[in-house]
Image (cartoon, helix red, strand yellow):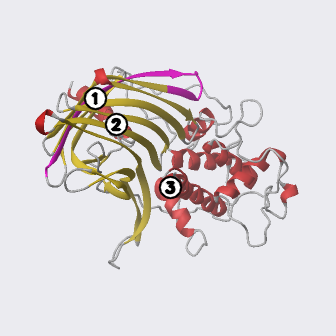
Amino acid sequence: MKKRILLLVLALIMTLTTSTYALEIPGYDGGIKNEMLYREVIFITGEPVVVEGVVNISNSANSISITFRNLSNADKTVTLTRNVTYGKSINSNGSDQRTETYSLNRFRETITANGVKYESTEKTNQWSKSTIMHKKPGVEYFKGSWDGRRVYTINKNQGTVEVTTVGDTYGYEQHWGATETQRIQHYISYNRTLPGGNGAQNRVSWQGTAEILTSHNTTKDYSYEPNIPTQSSFKGAYMLVEQQENVLKYSYDLPRFNDAGEILSQRNTGVNSLSLNTNPVNQMLFIPAMTDILGNTNERDILFLASLGALNPNSQSFGPTLPMSRGDFARSMVTILDLLEKEQTNVRQRSTAVQEKPRTFIDVRETDPNSKYIEAAFKKGIMQGAGTNQFLPNQYLTKAQAITVIVKALGFEHLAPIQRYFTGFRDDDQIPIWAKDSVYVARELGILRDTNDGYLQPNKWLTKAEAAELLVDFVDYLQHELRYDYRERILNYSH
């Protein structure tokens, strides 16, 4: 009984561990958060006000509930409380696409600013959002849009503030990082009636706009950490560092008031930003055993990949100048992209007999150290068999073949120009037709480096050292260049 409970607990821990990497976005009001704090900018008072506090998110199969508690600005003159529940429905095309559609089920918000109370409920709210997800072997990409109209009462019966919102979100998720960037446009219409002297009434009306850009990023970086003592069994080890970075950038065009609260002809415009990051999580990697790579140009690349397990870390003889086999390359790709299905222990199974699973390829036995990686690479669609029910795991692969596998994992096979183009290599005419688009895309993305002599040599066997360089460049792309396109390019060049 104790053993069964322990297995259940371990399975639960595995589930939690694999699910915590996804980004947790705190709603669609342009806020950012870390482990302890949430920040947002509001504009309905006629000026930008940064409020912060606590947010709790509850995500189920059919709904998302978000509670914003005790939000306030620095001098406590503005407070905000918000409770919102979104309904969620998911549809799939049965292949690599799915849509998620959200609607507003419940909403209640109260903002108090300098004694003035603004209130809104689901009765005065219209909001809907839809997102399309496109799942590729190594990355899932998505794009979403939403529209909303929120009406606040001012002190119950003194008027209303109507905020019309248009939002877009762009993002991706993969093993080395996840990014979601939101672009939100607010159009504000403020109308309030105040009692004046002698029974007269004073009307205050203004219009304003605000743009909010938020970017939520999970990053996973690596570094080599030297072991400073000289009397040690190892010189150093690689370390992974995972962290969430959240940026909020906002601009506004609002009315300008004098000390008496009267609207001036000049406008109050500006741009500002703030950020919240999580505490880094460090993970030391195992030390590889290989000893024949000292002084090799790609020594650090090889050590890093072996530390990940993408190359066999227990083999002392690596052979950096030897050709890379198809089986070893499958292992590297599957490990880098974390494509192995998590093994689950069947707690009801009493028999200890090991049953060999049906083989997809007749030339790949279960005892092959690369068998599970080959199976995953085939199932995920990044590598195909060769011939009838064969994979040829020990056959070498060419540069062109390796590049094609990487581009296929990204889902970028069709990004090459339709019209005639030149890949930039002097032996462009030697690149196989089936690999030319992938070579072009990989070079444009910076995954494939230019060579010193300008020749790619696409049909040459790829050495293990060359494979390590190519694979590390692929990791660097997943870490940095993909994030730049989804974060910096939108934040810095949005209009």
Q: Decide if residue 356 is in sight here.
A: no
Who is closer to the viewer here, 453 or 113? 113
The CA span between labels 3 and 1 is 34 Å
Report whether 366 appears left or right of 448: left
The CA span between labels 1 and 2 is 9 Å
The CA span between labels 3 and 2 is 25 Å
Up-down relation of residue 162 to residue 312 (above or below): above
User: Of the residues shown, which amino acid type is indicated by label 2?
Assistant: Gly
Q: Position of residue 336 (x, y in %)?
A: 52, 49
Q: Position of residue 372 (x, y in %)?
A: 55, 38
Q: Which residue is denoted by mark 2 in the rendering?
A: 27
Who is closer to the viewer here, 212 or 276? 212
Q: Is the residue under label 2 in contact with that under label 3 (CB below 8 Å)?
A: no
What stretch of residues is rendered in magenta? 76-99
User: Of the residues shown, which amino acid type is indicated by label 1?
Assistant: Val
Q: Which residue is denoted by mark 3 in the rendering?
A: 479
Residue 95 on the magenta span:
yes
Q: Is the residue under label 2 in contact with that under label 1 (CB below 8 Å)?
A: yes
- SS of the residue under disc 2: loop
Circle 3 packing at 10 Å, graded few (<14), some (14-19), many (20+), is: many
| Residue 150 quadrant | top left
